[in-house]
Amino acid sequence: MNEQVSVGIDVATAGVRAFAVRGGSVLATASASLPAPVRAGGGRSEQDPSAWWPAVGSVLNGVTAALPGRGTEVSAVAIAATSGTIVGVDAAGEPVTPALMYDDRRGADYNAKAVELGARRWRKLGSGVSPTAALGRIAWLAEHTEAVAVRHTPEMIAAKLTGHPVAADWSHALKSGYDPLAEEWPTEVFAGLGVPDGMLPPVVAPTSVLGEISVPVAGLPAGCLVVAGMTDGCAGQLAAGAVEPGRFVGILGTTYVLKGVTETLVPDPTGVMYSHRHPDGWWLPGGAANTGGESVSDSLRLAELDAAAAARGPAEVVAFPLRRKGERFPFAHGDAEGFVLGSPVDEVELHRARLEGVAFLERLALDHLRRLGVPIREPLLAAGGGSKSPLWTQIRATVNGLGLQVAAQAETGYGAALLAAAGCTSGGLRAACKGMPVGSLVEPSSGESAAMLASYQRFCRELRARGWIDDELFTVAAG
């Protein structure tokens, strides 16, 4: 068990949070807010990058001041941030543009061209280039601004800590176009888009040491290592316990996300899943749905409805509780819309059907992995706000036919602290994760399994009838 103190910094859209961790136990946390992004016409989504460092300094001072006893000094720090947020900088590394956020769409046309320019490369990776990928925003900055280089959020913070420019980690660089299989930037793509090589930072593996703090800063001592982190989603996955091959976590927040670990890259011909690279060279496949916790967000009586739905048992109706148009995982269809098969007798049955519908989507995501040959170790890990509902967790376990282990600590900052610890631990990430707390285990309900399976198959038949899933996935799901 690692007994050194490490700090993980989570730079999210609305704020910054830090975790101080030793041996898997959280010693202290601190948080600070950030100004809301400015979203305007033309797909613009911007934030002032000069606000990041004061907020980071505040949480670092707060978390280090809360450490117990004298002599409790931080050995390493790592940063996790939103995936795809970039800043144009000058030769000194200072911002000359606003931060273009992960959902900024000014690079959409460039990304469409990048799909063609890098078609062979993307096929090998089994992934595509989305309209909001940071790759296109880099090309937009090259054409429309005076920026001489591009940096992701963690590089900006790490440079403040070390006093010098640092490399990007290959997790934050992924949506900027970095090829984690060849371990290189797609120079042919950027050349075709008119982006000079010098605009792109060097790239290293997460947990690599980027430098060290030369003089005390924000409560961190001189000699403290600055370690390469990962994106917020990847750091959250590690925090939930999905660290080794076969381990997967279903994160049920506003939307549903499935992430896990495989020994080798698993290309997805359907394009609904993409893979980050694990710090140890393995792969982190995953996908994000448009369906999830927002399916019940209109109710102010969730606890009451949960209790009534638990007493009622499985719903007679089947729901796909998609609140918006279009789905992206585990199938992609721009015209997909939510539906209810049958007429609920009351709001309790509708509530239960919605919970089951999200569980059906999770099962379909697991079946999609199975058809790609991905092994899934039991139990399935669970995280996110929806996992706090005992009923929903029980339904998910029963639908999946797998034990569901609710993560004890799935915060992004906690995962970043584990990455920091791995940078100064001889055993790497697995050794740093040995002291992680283990969450509660929920087993499938044998009394409801048959009803849940019948409803899941009905759910899948409807998806196939609407042309949203193909025959191969339906066969795997129905089997």
Image (cartoon, rainbow, N blue to C red):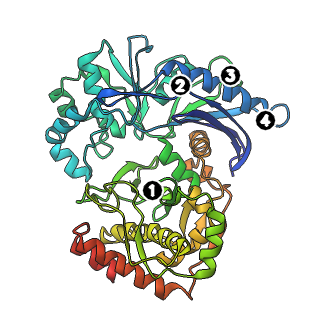
Tell which circle, 3 or 1, labels the residue nearer the N-terminal end: 3
Tell which circle, 4 or 1, labels the residue nearer the N-terminal end: 4
Q: Nearer the viewer, residue 31 or 216?
A: 31
Q: Residues within 10 Å of mark 3 (few under 14, many from 20)?
A: some
Label 3 element class: loop
Tell which circle, 2 or 4, labels the residue nearer the N-terminal end: 4
Q: In the rendered view, does 449 fall on the left or right side of 103?
A: right
Give percent across and percent down for residue 427: 58, 49
**Number of the front mark, 3 or 1:** 1
Q: Residue at x 39, y 48 (%)?
A: 276
Which residue is the site of mark 2?
157
- Residue 218 badge: 3
Asked if labels 1 and 4 touch by Cβ distance under 8 angstroms, the answer is no
> Residue 198, relative to residue 371: is it above or below?
above
Q: Amino acid at mark 1?
A: Val
Which residue is the site of mark 4?
67
Which residue is the site of mark 1?
257
Q: Amino acid at mark 4?
A: Leu
In space, the residues marked 2 and 4 are separated at their CA atoms by 22 Å
Label 2 element class: helix
